[in-house]
Amino acid sequence: MPTLENDLTPYATMLSFTRYVGRTGPKKASFVSGLRRARQAKSGFNPHGQLVKALKADIQFRTPGTHLEAVVQAVKPRWRPLYEASTTGAARYLESLGDLDKLWLAQTHDALAVIGGLPVKINPHLGLRYEGGRAEAVRLHFDETPPSDETVVATLHLMAAHMGLILPHAEPVLVDVRRGSVFRADTTSKPADIDRWLTGEAAAFAAMWSTAS
């Protein structure tokens, strides 16, 4: 993996790469340029960390929404509107999981993929293991707009392709937190076609990164 503090080698997180593939035309180049500038400035902050912890706590302690409700008041006032916009959908997702006594949090691991020469860090937010042995690796989508079809396909495919490292035998799941919507892989899709598409997208990302100023 590149040394992010000192190295401007092309590199993407799963979040940035799947946001990139959901863009079209000149928006792709401007997005990559913005990522490179942020790397140079060593800037970046994840405001959703406490929400993820609250969701995990509600699952772990079988408290449907209690921690999600509390975290809205616990965050700094500047982040409260963001949390208010997210917790309703997060609670809807939590309810969709069914009986919380019949599932448990599972440990997931990050994976590093190299796609078309581009290193991409694949990092789900949480793992779930259900009574009976079924498991899921879950990535959360926090953006104000719903995930594009391309973002959904790319996210689920990247996790599925590296599930042996992330959470063996688990199913990849993408959750649109603001709307509480759940996305699963299309069983009729052809992984080889998606691989070719993502390889081309990654190569273009790396090229744009290298020419950005």
Image: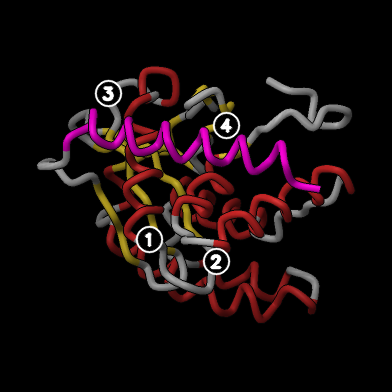
Query: Under tag 3, what secondary structure?
Result: loop
Q: Which residue is mark 3?
A: 169
Which residue position holds label 4? 121
Q: Which mark is residue 68?
A: 2
Tell me the kind of residue under disc 3: His
Q: Is residue 201 magenta?
A: yes
**Label disc, if present, on residue 94 of the rendered structure:** 1
Q: Position of residue 164 (x, y in %)?
A: 36, 18
> Upstream in the sequence, badge 2 or badge 3?
2
Q: CA distance from mark 3 to mark 1?
A: 22 Å
State which tag comes first along the sequence, 3 or 1: 1
Image point (73%, 55%), residue name: 34
Look at the image and say whether residue 53 sits in the magenta stretch. Answer: no
Q: Point out which mark residue 81 bears.
A: none
Q: Look at discs 3 and 1 and give the one toward the viewer.
A: 3
Element type where label 4 sits in the image: strand
Observer-nearest of 27 and 114: 27
Q: Residue at x 52, y 33 (%)?
A: 203
Mark 4 and mark 1: Cα distance apart in space: 26 Å
Q: Quadrant of residue 180?
A: bottom left
- Marks 2 and 3 sit apart, C-alpha to C-alpha, by 29 Å
Which mark sits nearer the N-terminus, 4 or 3? Answer: 4
Q: Nearer the viewer, residue 46 or 4?
A: 4
